[in-house]
Image (cartoon, rainbow, N blue to C red):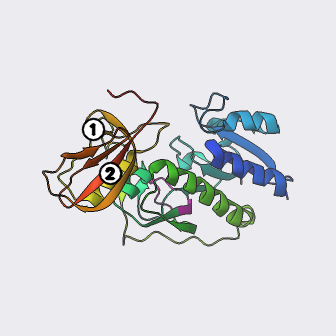
Amino acid sequence: MPKTICIAGKNRIAIDGLNHLLKYHSGHRLLAICNPTDDGTDGWQPSFRRHCRQAGVAVTTLDAVYAIEDMIFISLQFSEILKTGRFRSPHLFNIHFSLLPAYKGMDTILHTLRNGERRTGATLHLIDDGIDTGATIAQRSFPIGEQHTARDLYSMHLDNAAALFREQVAGLLTLDYTAHPQGHHGASYYGRNAFDYSRIEADFRQCAWQVHNHFRALIFPEFQLPEFNGRKIARSRITPRRSMAKPGTVMAEDGGRLIVATIDYDVELTKATGFRDS
């Protein structure tokens, strides 16, 4: 029997999910809800609203879908806060960019990199009235390389979340899945104000690993780049050279690169091109 499926979200992940439904589950009624910031024009990410219009999928609102019984609602980077009690359907799902129960909340990529994690992933879970606290259905994990930046990690999340969606969506549509309550071991949460983006200068009175992680966690050119002494930084790398000077001392500079001391190893910083030093 045909169902109503609503995809709510943004960017390539929402488009990939919608395209999969159109190709393999076209017998169902498809609806879309776009994030308020999506004005229908492509930017550094493609517009979900524009894609829906081109694909002939009706764009609707939360208020309109609250009353739809037995709807399958899937959030793919949807920005609005959901109140489950307002839905007449209990079939509410989300894909979160972390391996829950770790890194609930905001800015999961930034905190994952700042903490030096070696692995992350995407989690399909039920939506409840908490913040990413719903029972988990499936996960897809992948490794984080030492040189991966926030921008790199976002692209990797999009790929893996789309793959997780493709693997699991048939079970969601038939309600053939098992959900497991999240445990407390390894759980963490970061709120909207957990990091101050107005203070992006690194503290070099730390180990090189901590300094490097700070830089790469902020390297996302579409939003911001980290800085050192007013210079915008596009890459960082830990050198094998032990630091022999006060942390923060510039040991060498050759125009495009800086070598800076920390408390243990020097860090090489590559200055961004196309940006004026402040």
Q: Residue at x 16, y 51 (%)?
A: 247
Residue 218's place in the image compared with 49, above or below, is below
Marks 1 and 2, how far apart in space?
21 Å
Instruction: Estimate the x, y position of residue 257 in percent, counting from the top left.
Output: 35, 44
Majority secondary structure in the magenta region: loop
Residue tagged 1: 199
Residue 75's place in the image compared with 197, above or below, is below
209 or 218: nearer the viewer: 209
Instruction: Estimate the x, y position of residue 68 in percent, counting from the top left.
Output: 71, 46
Instruction: Estimate the x, y position of residue 198 in percent, counting from the top left.
Output: 30, 35
Res. 22 mark? none
Mark 1 Cα-neighbour bin, 10 Å: few <14, some 14–19, many ≥20: few
Mark 2 Cα-neighbour bin, 10 Å: few <14, some 14–19, many ≥20: many
Res. 268 mark? 2
173 or 232: nearer the viewer: 232
- Going by the numbered disc 1, the residue's amino acid type is Arg
Q: Of label 1 and label 2, which has the lower sequence position?
A: 1
Q: Residue at x 42, y 67 (%)?
A: 118
Q: Which residues are magenta?
A: 122-134
